[in-house]
Image (cartoon, helix red, strand yellow):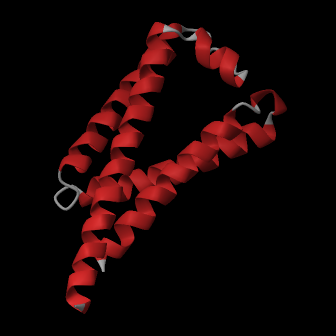
Amino acid sequence: MKITRAFARRFRLLRLLTLSLLCGAAYDLFFAALMVLAPDVPVRLFHLPLPGETFYLWLMATFLLMLAACYLLAAQDPRRYSGIIAIAIAGRWLGALAFTVAAWQNPNLAGLYPLAAADFLFGAAHAVCWVPLRA
């Protein structure tokens, strides 16, 4: 009985991990699309200034698309791509820290706080589901 519960818990965590990775990929794809197709939307939504050149938005969108693709790979087979998951957790938490520090240093960037919270929560969701699977 105990073994069955342990396996059920592992499979539940695996499904939740996959779901959190898919949500992370969708989040990144959404913001990549906004940066290219409607850059004024994040500006209005988060009260953030646009960079001087649209090239920088396109570059960030490219990185977000690459990140989303890595998330989709990891969601497809979390055991095989566990290194991507570890990097995603660390990257989300570092992103949250970077957004928080930037917003704290410059009150005009207060719109970064919700993005910091989202990155922190994605990192936490991935970690809560992934770390127990590693044991």
Which residue shows up at 43% across the image and 22% down it? 32
Q: Residue extending furthest right?
A: 107
Q: Quadrant of residue 14?
A: bottom left
**Left or right of residue 54, residue 42 in this image:** right
| Residue 121, placed above or below residue 14 | above
Q: Could you say where residue 105 lies in the image, as x and y percent from the top left?
A: 79, 40
Q: Nearer the viewer, residue 105 or 13?
A: 13
Q: Residue extending furthest front?
A: 1
Which residue shows up at 29% across the image and 58% down it? 15
Q: Residue extending furthest bottom?
A: 2
Which residue shows up at 25% across the image and 74% down it? 8
| Residue 40, placed above or below residue 121 | above
Q: Nearer the viewer, residue 58 or 16?
A: 16
Q: Could you say where residue 49 lies in the image, as x and y percent from the top left?
A: 69, 17
Q: Tell me if residue 60 can be seen.
A: no
**Left or right of residue 116, residue 77 in this image:** left
Which residue shows up at 62% across the image and 50% down it? 97
Q: Nearer the viewer, residue 98 or 36?
A: 36
In the rendered view of the protein, which quadrant contains the C terminus?
bottom left
Q: Could you say where residue 132 lies in the image, as x and y percent from the top left?
A: 36, 75
**Left or right of residue 109, residue 91 in this image:** left
Q: Could you say where residue 120 lies in the image, as x and y percent from the top left?
A: 57, 51
In the rendered view of the protein, which quadrant contains the N terminus?
bottom left
Q: Tell me if residue 84 can be seen.
A: yes
Q: Nearer the viewer, residue 81 or 132?
A: 132
| Residue 12, placed above or below residue 1 | above
Counting labels gives 0
**Left or right of residue 76, residue 107 in this image:** right
Q: Quadrant of residue 71?
A: top left
| Residue 83, placed above or below residue 31 | below
